[in-house]
Amino acid sequence: MKPEKLSDSEFVYNKPSVESYKEFENFIIAALKNFKTKFKIVENVIHVNRTILYHIRSRLDQRHDYYKYFHSSETKTTFISQTKETAIICYWLIKYKPLSHYNEVSERYYEKHDCTINEMFALFLLETYIYRVHKNKNNVSIFFNQENKRILLYNFMHRDMSKEAFILYVSSLIGALEL
């Protein structure tokens, strides 16, 4: 419900600042650099569609507002968790596919991995985040074996999940690793 003190014309979505878009772009570019290093991907093979990245940043900002608006009480504001934010970024990377290869590289990549570079990058972001926040690194490294990565990539590529289902999927994964 719209707060009484706001008029209808004031009750509109406000886009993130230009600085916020640039911060997000820098975060993705830095993560992509680490991704390329880990997987020994040469420079200039991956193209980044910055327009799609900015759209993902807007979607993330909208989800921040959603949590504040729909999950807050009159006395306490609720903010999106880092886990949910990571899940949302991964979801939109998989959905909008802002990364691409040249066609022949893309075809070979798909043939080898049964996914696109976007699903692989989303898995990289997820794994990096979980290693960063998880206390028991041994459980994480045991979980992220080749077979489980293959299953995750398959699910990212071929399963139809809503944003909420994807958030639950990632949250459950993190919860299971904490046991």
Image: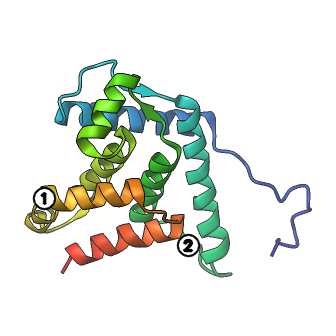
Q: Is residue 23 visible?
A: yes
Which residue shows up at 38% across the image and 70% down it? 169
Crowd rating for badge 2 (residues with CA inside 10 Å; few <14, some 14–19, many 20+): some
Which residue shows up at 32% across the image and 39% down it? 110
- Position of residue 151 measured from the top left corner of the image (x, y, whole percent): 26, 61
> Image quarter for residue 73?
bottom right
Identify the residue under disc 2: 78
Which residue shows up at 33% across the image and 34% down it? 32
Q: Is residue 102 left or right of residue 139?
A: right
Question: Total number of numbered labels?
Answer: 2
Q: Amino acid at mark 1?
A: Asn
Identify the residue under disc 1: 145
Colour setup of the view: rainbow
Observer-nearest of 175 and 120: 120
The vertical placement of 176 against 39, above or below, is below
Per the image, label 2 sits on a secondary structure element best described as loop
The vertical placement of 21 against 82, above or below, is above
Quadrant (top left, top right, bottom left, bottom right) of the N terminus: bottom right
- Position of residue 20 measured from the top left corner of the image (x, y, whole percent): 55, 40
The vertical placement of 149 against 116, above or below, is below
- Position of residue 160 measured from the top left corner of the image (x, y, whole percent): 48, 63
Q: Is residue 144 visible?
A: no
Which residue shows up at 52% across the image and 70% down it? 164
Per the image, label 1 sits on a secondary structure element best described as loop
Q: Earlier in the sequence, mark 1 or mark 2?
A: 2
Q: Is residue 110 left or right of residue 63?
A: left
Q: Is residue 24 left or right of residue 30?
A: right
Crowd rating for badge 1 (residues with CA inside 10 Å; few <14, some 14–19, many 20+): few
Q: Amino acid at mark 2?
A: Thr
